[in-house]
């Protein structure tokens, strides 16, 4: 996996939660890319191929708990994932979301959306609006990982 400059600083590491935190305990999906600071995982959701999460490795609750340089680093990874998913899956829209209500560990969802997906135009966590699924392009974890590594190796990433 690619390694970038580590940024481990955070103002709010909640040690009491780390032992029980789902994202501290397991990767959260197939790891496509990682650095000392964060990792990109693919979510296994057949309705949303290309759905990825960008997870900050240290147990941090909020973006504002990171120093500005770490925030920029994290968002550069989020934007690279968005670009990779757009290139490979050609969705109609990308949703970016960071909630942390269920798992209070800093992470971003990068979700490809299509006008004919199960929930469109509602959030993917909402009520299903339609059944059935149009076949989407099959993209392997390896291809997505390669594209992401290429984007993250470019200057300004």
Image (cartoon, rainbow, N blue to C red):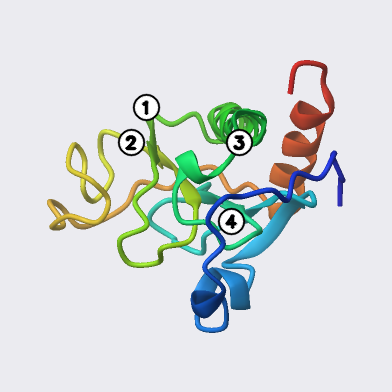
| Alpha-carbon span between mark 2 and mark 1 | 5 Å
| Alpha-carbon span between mark 2 and mark 3 | 35 Å
Please state which of the two labelled residues, at mark 3 or mark 1, is closer to the viewer: 3
Mark 3, residues whose alpha carbon is within 10 Å: few (<14), some, or many (≥20)? some
**Nearer-N-terminus badge (3/4):** 4
Which residue is at the front of the view, 87 or 29?
A: 29
The reply to whether residue 21 is visible in this rendering is: no
- Identify the element where label 2 is drawn: loop
* Residue 63: image location, x then y, percent: 48, 42
Which residue is pictured at 72% across the width and 49% down the height?
A: 37
Please state which of the two labelled residues, at mark 2 or mark 4, is closer to the viewer: 4
For the residues bearing labels 2 and 1, Cβ distance under 8 angstroms: yes
* Residue 40: image location, x then y, percent: 65, 50
Q: Which quarter of the figure is the C terminus placed in? A: top right
- Identify the element where label 4 is drawn: strand
Left or right: where 108 falls relative to 149 = left
* 57 to 144, vertically: above or below: below
| Residue 114: image tag | 2
| Alpha-carbon span between mark 1 and mark 4 | 19 Å
- Identify the element where label 3 is drawn: loop
User: Circle 1 sits on which residue?
Assistant: 92
| Alpha-carbon span between mark 3 and mark 1 | 33 Å
* 48 to 29, vertically: above or below: above
The reply to whether residue 134 is visible in this rendering is: yes
| Residue 42: image tag | 4
**Nearer-N-terminus badge (3/1):** 3
Which residue is pictured at 54% across the width and 32% down the height?
A: 82
| Alpha-carbon span between mark 2 and mark 4 | 18 Å
Mark 2, residues whose alpha carbon is within 10 Å: few (<14), some, or many (≥20)? some
Quarter of the figure with residue 102: bottom left
């Amino acid at each position: 996996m690619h390694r970038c400059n580590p940024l481990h600083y955070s103002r709010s590491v909640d040690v009491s939660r780390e032992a029980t935190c789902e994202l501290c305990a397991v990767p959260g999906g197939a790891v496509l890319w990682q650095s000392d600071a964060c990792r990109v995982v693919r979510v296994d959701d057949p309705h949303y191929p290309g759905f990825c999460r960008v997870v900050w490795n240290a147990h941090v609750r909020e973006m504002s708990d990171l120093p500005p340089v770490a925030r920029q680093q994290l968002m550069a990874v989020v934007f690279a994932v968005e670009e990779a998913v757009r290139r490979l899956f050609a969705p109609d829209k990308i949703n970016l979301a960071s909630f942390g209500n269920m798992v209070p560990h800093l992470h971003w969802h990068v979700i490809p959306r299509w006008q004919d997906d199960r929930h469109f135009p509602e959030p993917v966590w909402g009520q299903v609006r339609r059944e059935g699924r149009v076949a989407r392009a099959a993209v392997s974890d390896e291809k997505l990982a390669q594209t992401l590594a290429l984007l993250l190796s470019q200057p300004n990433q």
